[in-house]
Image (spheres, rainbow, N blue to C red):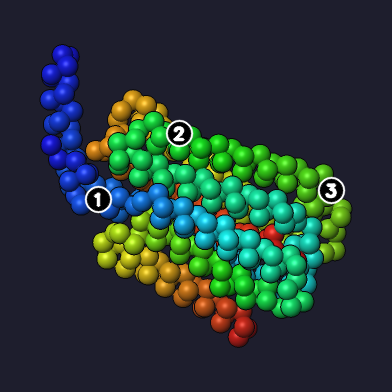
Amino acid sequence: MSDVAAEAGRAEHAHAEHGDYEGAKLGMWLFLFSECMLFGGLFVLYAMYRADHPRAFSAGGSHMDALLGVANTLVLLTGSFAVASSITALQRGRRRLAMGLVGTTILTGVAFMIVKAVEWSGHIRQGYFPHSQLLQGKPGEQLFFSLYYVMTGLHGLHVIAGIAVLTAALILMARRKVTQEHFVFLENAALYWHLVDIIWIFLLPLFYLAA
Amino acid sequence: MAHEATEEIHVVSYTTYTLVWAALVGLTLLLSSISLLRVGGGRWNSLAAFIISPLKAALVVFFFMHLKYEKTLFRIMLMVTLCIIVIFLGLTFLDVALR
């Protein structure tokens, strides 16, 4: 296909997309609300069990490395800041800067997962997991650690998914499919990342600052 | 050619994002110091988490997620979601409390 034909094809494609911008974002928000419900259920479960076993949850919290949790929070917040700024950069036509910022967010996600892996392996090595010898006869702490693995684990899966979506956005930007004029993919990828950030904002006090 | 830039896009400045990020970092450090330094013997721990965490989430939603610049429909949808979660939590608490 000649360049002119390709250009015409792109223009036509863009025309076909007219009016979808609002809808694309609306769809993403609806999906994010369903995610809120998914995590909401787990937060309700946490609240009920904590009300039943306040002392055990506090004891469970004392086995957490709060500083790692706080550090990971700062890492995620910085990632959110970078991806939010990347949209501004792209809208202002600073494509390379925008790509650099998305790359930064991906790196913060990877750093977050590395810290998470260190934490989890430490806890498992020390015997803090459901049905371990150490937690025999401590039902409250078993619940605390079950919820800890399920909630931070599900959140971790979301971080991995977020990294994948942001990588896709980066590739699309490199191929000029996501551009100064068509940035809704990047916006939606960023929305997803921010949701992951928000969930962590609530996980921090529930587990790391529970002591 | 129709594209997103024609639909009245509000470009948020880097300054706004930087201020929001600084506020988020500040609130995180405030919350963790209240908790880890056991301010007031740990009495403020839960209260701080109940106030500061939603505040942080609101900053992310309104600025990073652009809700401040979106149409009212998005805000209504968020309110509906929050109401459902509150009902969910409230009814579950009532169930457990009145068993």
Percent across and percent down for residue A158 are 52, 46
Pair 1/3: label in front: 1
Which residue does the image show at 62% across and 76% down from the upper left?
B47
Can residue A39 be seen here? The reply is: no
Measure how far apart labels 3 and 2 are at the Cα level. Answer: 39 Å
Percent across and percent down for residue B68 are 34, 62
**Callout 1: few (<14), some (14-19), or many (20+) C-alpha neighbours within 10 Å?**
few
Whether discs 1 and 3 lie on one chain: the answer is: no
- Three-letter residue code for mark 1: Ile
Does residue A67 appear left or right of residue A176 in this picture?
Answer: right
Pair 3/2: label in front: 2
Seen in the picture, residue A10 relative to A182 is either above or below; the reply is: above
Can residue B80 be seen here? The reply is: yes
User: Which mark, residue A126?
Assistant: 3
Q: Secondary structure at mark 2?
A: helix
Which residue does the image show at 75% across and 42% down from the upper left?
A121
Q: Find disc 1 in the rendering and name its residue.
A: B9
Q: Residue furthest bottom?
A: B98
